[in-house]
Amino acid sequence: MVKDYKPLVAQMTNDLKDRHVLAAAIACRADHLVTFNLKHFLSPPGHTHELIGIRPSAFLKQIAGLDRDAVELRNA
């Protein structure tokens, strides 16, 4: 649960309906924001947080490269 993100919402310049999501990601110092809608999640100009917007499939491929056993679905 992300707390204390609401004061950041007004500073966000991305799509109005998605500003709370970007503010929460920045408030919790997330490294990645996983979404199908990358165009609505650009960081505000001049913001210093390094947040990477990434599509779900690319994120899973990235994780698989780190620890394949953690993301593979194995048939029992």
Image: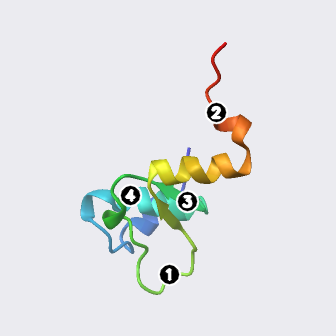
In the rendered structure, find residue 57 and report the number of the disc placed on it.
none
Q: Amino acid at mark 2?
A: Glu
C-alpha separation, residue under disc 1 versus residue under disc 2: 36 Å
Name the N-terminal-most of marks 4 and 2: 4
Name the N-terminal-most of marks 3 and 2: 3
- Contact between labelled residues 3 and 4, with CB atoms less than 8 Å apart: no
Mark 1 lies on residue: 47
Q: Residues within 10 Å of mark 2 (few under 14, many from 20)?
A: few
Q: Which residue is situated farthest in the bottom direction here? A: 46
Q: Is 49 situated left or right of 19 in this image? A: right
C-alpha separation, residue under disc 1 versus residue under disc 3: 15 Å
Q: Residues within 10 Å of mark 3 (few under 14, many from 20)?
A: some
Mark 4 lies on residue: 20
Mark 2 lies on residue: 72
Residue 41 percent across, percent down from the top left: 38, 65
In the rendered structure, find residue 32 and report the number of the disc placed on it.
3
Q: Quadrant of the N terminus?
A: top right
